[in-house]
Image (tube, grey):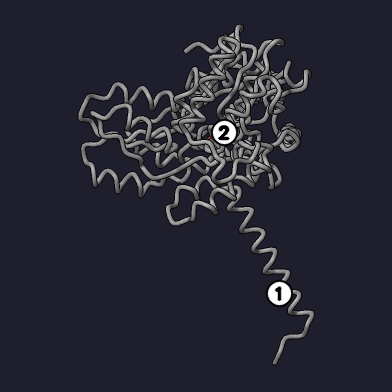
């Protein structure tokens, strides 16, 4: 029996919406699909052109696209023309072709130090994700501009916390503990408004390179620390400083009192926002066990955004800068298994061919991967104009205090 006309339209509408959702997903992650060989080149090219259009980059369709070498040559020419007026900062997780063209590469701490120290460049182009470029803009001098080649390069972890939610949590906490003894500590991976929140309440910012010093600073200054948004970095750092499990609680922003009993909050020395990085929580205990079995002599090093059981099983854990040094200092012939973003692991394997550098599992940050040669070239073609990252004066002043406290921490 044929379906009534209304139902046919209903199903057709549903099918259309599903197709639209799928297409939007492909557009968002076309760069991952482009790694999959069976996707036709024309489809990838079309998706890329559409994503470029959405992000405001001039689309270059198949046949008109510049080859990688041509793009690199054009970027080199722009660099030569701009000379010392230009500074390109690249994060360790960037694509190899981007890192090769940067003036400095590093982790978010190293790059923020570079951004703060440089007075010469008028144009800073930040090849990383948005919160990093925003931090550089906060630390930059009035005559400097900071650009990000793709403003849509965000961070899913940073999106897990917003100023309004932290302000609400702070008010709720004030009902059971004395807020005068509570020190806010924002992970670098957060929006500028949260850094400003910390700066205006006697707190500071940290990266994974200095989380231990920052947390110790906070615990000396107050009775307890409110850390956001990465609960795993917070917990791993708290454990390192000798905090007991019952001294650390997780704050669920959806639940009353963050899902905690008042006594638990009064006992806590570290309150952890319920956020995480999906790139690093992808690494599981099973991955470590399987790799240890396959490579019994290997050393396992992971990023502290991994879960505590993974960090506990590893031989070492630390920031991306720490991981780079770990591989550099390993003797030739050593096998090192790394639990962090795949672009860094691949680059370390290529940089140290006399060591066996393997990934704990394939894990790619799609936001870091959004920065491409053509977007970098587009930024350099309009220095100081295209995708300039700005922060309001009030936010910048308070956020700078919190960032400066971090930069002043003693190693
Ligand atoms: S690796 Fe994780 S924390 Fe870093 S930018 Fe990507 S999603 Fe954010």
Image-based side of 294 in relation to 82, left or right: left
Residue 240 vertical placement versus 118 (above, below): below
Q: Secondary structure at mark 2?
A: helix
Point out residue 229 in the picture as x, y percentages from the top left corner: 60, 35
Quarter occupied by residue 315: top left
Can you identify the residue that label 1 sits on?
Answer: 11
Q: Residue at x 45, y 27 (%)?
A: 319
Point out residue 373 in the picture as x, y percentages from the top left corner: 53, 32
Point out residue 218 in the picture as x, y percentages from the top left corner: 59, 20
Can you identify the residue that label 2 sits on?
Answer: 374
Residues 182 and 310: in front is 310
Give neighbour class at mark 1: few <14, some 14-19, many 20+ (Cα, 10 Å). Answer: few
Residue 242 vertical placement versus 255 (above, below): above
Q: Residue at x 21, y 26 (%)?
A: 332
Quarter occupied by residue 349: top left
Residues 63 and 106: in front is 63
Point out residue 177 in the picture as x, y percentages from the top left corner: 69, 31
Residues 67 and 206: in front is 67
Residue 21 vertical placement versus 322 (above, below): below
Front label number (1 vs 2): 2
Determine the CA span between mark 1 and mark 2. 41 Å
The answer, for residue 244, to whether it is visible in the render is no
Image-based side of 10 in relation to 343, left or right: right
- From this viewpoint, which residue is outermost toward the front? 63
Q: Residue at x 43, y 23 (%)?
A: 321
Are the residues flagged by discs 1 and 2 in contact, CB closer than 8 Å? Answer: no
The answer, for residue 146, to whether it is visible in the render is yes
Which quadrant does the N terminus fall into? bottom right
């Amino acid at each position: 029996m044929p379906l009534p006309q209304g139902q046919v339209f209903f199903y057709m509408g549903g099918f259309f919406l599903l197709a639209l959702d799928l297409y939007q997903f492909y557009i968002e992650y076309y760069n991952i699909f482009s790694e999959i060989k069976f996707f036709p080149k024309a489809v990838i090219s079309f998706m890329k052109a559409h994503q470029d259009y959405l992000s405001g980059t001039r689309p270059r369709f198949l046949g008109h696209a510049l080859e990688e070498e041509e793009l690199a040559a054009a970027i080199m020419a722009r660099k030569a023309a701009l000379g010392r007026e230009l500074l390109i900062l690249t994060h360790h997780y960037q694509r190899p072709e981007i890192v090769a063209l940067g003036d400095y590469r590093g982790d978010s701490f190293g790059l923020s130090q570079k951004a703060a120290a440089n007075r010469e460049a008028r144009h800073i182009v930040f090849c990383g994700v948005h919160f990093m470029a925003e931090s550089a803009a906060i630390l930059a001098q009035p005559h400097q501009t900071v650009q990000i080649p793709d403003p849509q390069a965000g961070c899913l972890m940073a999106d897990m916390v917003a100023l309004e939610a932290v302000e609400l949590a702070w008010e709720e906490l004030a009902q059971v503990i004395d807020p005068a003894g509570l020190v806010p500590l924002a992970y670098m991976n957060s929006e500028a408004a949260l850094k400003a929140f910390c700066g205006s309440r006697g707190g500071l910012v940290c990266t994974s390179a200095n989380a231990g010093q920052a947390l110790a600073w906070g615990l000396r200054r107050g009775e307890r620390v409110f850390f956001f948004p990465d609960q795993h970095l917070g917990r791993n750092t708290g454990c390192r400083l000798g905090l007991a499990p019952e001294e650390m609680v997780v704050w669920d922003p959806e639940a009353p009192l963050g899902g905690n009993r008042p006594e638990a909050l009064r006992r806590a020395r570290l309150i952890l926002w319920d956020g995480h990085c999906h790139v690093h929580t992808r690494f599981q205990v099973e991955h470590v066990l399987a790799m240890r079995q396959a490579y019994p002599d290997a050393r396992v090093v992971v990023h502290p955004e991994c879960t505590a059981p993974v960090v506990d099983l590893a031989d070492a854990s630390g920031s991306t800068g720490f991981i780079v040094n770990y591989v550099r200092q390993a003797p030739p012939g050593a096998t090192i298994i790394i639990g962090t973003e795949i672009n860094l692991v691949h680059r370390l394997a290529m940089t140290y061919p006399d060591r066996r550098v393997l990934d704990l599992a394939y894990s790619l940050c799609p936001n870091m991967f959004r920065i491409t040669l053509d977007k970098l070239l587009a930024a350099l073609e309009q220095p100081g104009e295209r995708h300039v990252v700005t922060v309001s004066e009030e936010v910048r002043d308070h956020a700078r205090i919190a960032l400066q406290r971090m930069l002043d921490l003693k190693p």
